[in-house]
Amino acid sequence: MVGKQIFIILFISILLGSITNFVSPNKIPFIGEYRELSSGDGPVIPPSASEGDPPFIAIDVAEMEFSLKNTVFIDARDYEEFICATIPGSINIPFEYLPEENVAEFVDSSLSYMSKETPIIIFCSGEECDLSLHMARNMQDFGYTNLSIFFGGSREWENFELEMERGEGCVE
Amino acid sequence: MRRIIDNDFITLIFRVVVGAIFIYASYYKIIEPAVFAKGIWFYHMVPGNLINLLAVFLPWIELVCGVALIIGWQYRGTVILVNLMMIMFMIALGSAVYRGISIDCGCFQAAQASDSSAMNSLLWDVGIITMSIQLCLSKSKKWMLDK
């Protein structure tokens, strides 16, 4: 009796959950592909970081966000570096080549005018590169509210043997 | 004591309160499954390939249980499921407190790294499970769809 009732409740819930996740614009893969990654002491934080900067995240958090496919990754390096190896699906906004005028407009259009609340992770190559930090500070000024900085960058991503996207036309 | 536990009004009030909390708690999780999956991930207690399954189905179990509790449908099974979920939530929160993980509850919004203590949420859970245990023990059958 009780077992049958529990089965009915679970059956209805699983049915509704499945249907909703098929039709919802916010659907997620039924099976996650999270990996157990340890970043040792947590996120890499540069000495130049200051209070008010967006949060710095470690490799495990970056990979988790990547698996959820709910976050936009921005590669702040030059196009030549971006095309050779980047986190799959990343958008390239080279910080050093931002136009001198209408920077906010340029960034907004590069992101297809997506919502300013969209979760965004900014990275560059690694600890020696602070383009991600500068890009994040600028984007904060432009009104983006859900930013994180993955300061370990593409090198840490590659060191953990995570998938990299390599474009044609890479000149090493 | 038995008369208090079996009291029709107390049982009805606890059904409505616990049911409403479960319905409310399910809302954001259904709307934003990715955010809820992130919340589960932060606890580091669930194997990676089960996180999304839990994020998709658990909120619906909460919602269906909440509604079933209030209208008194499939009642015994619902009450047992509610108690099992409460025990599961308390183990998760207790574990976070024990391991010193700075995380907020994730009960009604996304769990994330936070300075606020999971201890407060744990205390709330004690209150809710007290009500759901009463529902488990009560023999009241009044104002229910189940006969």
Image: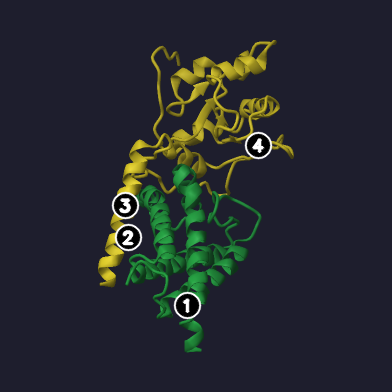
Chain colours: A yellow, B green
Nearer the observer, disc 4 or disc 3? 3
Q: Is residue B16 above or below residue A159?
A: below
Q: Chain of mark 4?
A: A
Q: Quadrant of the C terminus of chain A?
A: top left
Q: Does dot 3 land on a helix, a strand or a loop?
A: helix
Q: Is residue A149 above or below residue B104?
A: above
Nearer the observer, disc 1 or disc 3? 1
Residue A97 position in % (x across, y down): 62, 13
Q: Residues within 10 Å of mark 4 (few under 14, many from 20)?
A: many
Q: Classify residue B122 by image quadrant.
A: bottom right
Which residue occupies 55% across, 32% down? A118
Q: CA distance from mark 4 to mark 2?
A: 43 Å
Q: CA distance from mark 1 to mark 3?
A: 32 Å
Name which residue type carries label 2. Ile
Q: Which residue is mark 4?
A: A54
Q: Does dot 1 land on a helix, a strand or a loop?
A: helix
Q: CA distance from mark 4 to mark 3?
A: 38 Å
Q: CA distance from mark 1 to mark 2?
A: 24 Å
Inspect this view and state whether residue A38 appears: no
Name which residue type carries label 4. Pro
Q: Which residue is mark 3?
A: A14
Which badge, 4 or 3, comes first in the chain's sequence? 3
Which badge, 4 or 2, comes first in the chain's sequence? 2
Q: Quadrant of the N terminus of chain A?
A: bottom left
Which badge, 2 or 3, comes first in the chain's sequence? 2
Q: Do dots 1 and 2 share one subunit?
A: no
Q: Which residue is mark 1?
A: B8
Q: Chain of mark 3?
A: A
CB atoms of marks 4 and 1 within 8 Å: no
Name which residue type carries label 1. Asp
Residue A56 position in % (x across, y down): 61, 40
